[in-house]
Image (cartoon, helix red, strand yellow):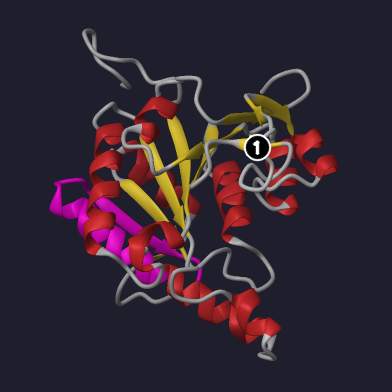
Amino acid sequence: MPGTSDGPVPRYRRVVLKLSGEALAGPAGYGVDPEVVHRYAQEIKEVVDLGVELAIVVGGGNIWRGTSGSAKGMDRTTADYMGMLATVINALALQDALEALGVPTRVQTAIEMKEIAEPYIRRRAIRHLEKGRVVIFAAGTGNPFFSTDTTAALRAAEIEAEVVLKATKEEGIYDKDPRQNPDARKFDEISYLDVLQRGLKAMDSTATSLCMDNQIPIVFFNLNVPGNIKRVVLGENIGTFIRGETGA
């Protein structure tokens, strides 16, 4: 059961954490930085130690972005499949770092590659979570034209997660770009519809709509502040909480 009699009690029992590929690159901005991955793994372990069932969706932008390849003349479908393969590389790096810390981890891919990972099977993923294993979902949805944000929303709905944690390099969601507008206002809470209607940079519109339809709240927070993953799981008021009009 989450928490202990003398320890903190998590707000959420089962969560999906969305990590961008860029987050794993570290200062270099490209590739996988083992030290950065190890630091994130340590923070993830702290959450697992609370008894939280944790699934992770990882992006691939540190290696390849399908939209970038498409913009330069590559076939979009081919470019997106390359991006899916990049997420598998990141998933394996994160799995290695977690298991080095003693955290049992399974990688499940939407594109079958049985020599290195399990295929995505919903019931098997849920069973892993129930046994205390971290499940990393790789290769997106297995379909081109869908982002890993949408993958996070889809998997959250499928495994009945209570929240999607969107880890970013920003403190939260603002009404305008805070880097260009000193008077930008951060939202502590905002509805799905407001995010969509204002065109705010949170998750993409497909992912936001999917969370809205299934009443899965989203917490948008800064990953670069040490301990923030645990703080969000414990229910501390950091970042921006995206919910329905009447609460989620």
- Foreground pick, 108 / 211: 211
Residue 48: x and y in percent read: 28, 35
- Dot 1 surroundings within 10 Å: few (below 14), some, or many (20 or more)? few
Mark 1 sits on what residue?
182
Image-quadrant location for residue 46: top left
Q: Quadrant of the C terminus?
A: top right
Q: Is residue 66 above or below residue 29?
A: below
Identified at 52% across, 42% down, the residue is 159
> Left or right of 23: which side holds 172?
right
Which residue of the protein is positioned furthest toward the right in this rendering?
197
> Left or right of 103: which side holds 12?
right
Residue 174: x and y in percent read: 67, 37
Count of marks overlaid on the render: 1
- Foreground pick, 45 / 185: 185
Please name the amino acid that badge 1 sits on: Pro
Q: Which residues are magenta?
A: 88-111
Identified at 50% across, 47% down, the residue is 168
Is residue 70 within the magenta segment?
no
> Left or right of 95: which side holds 214?
right
Identified at 41% across, 56% down, the residue is 23
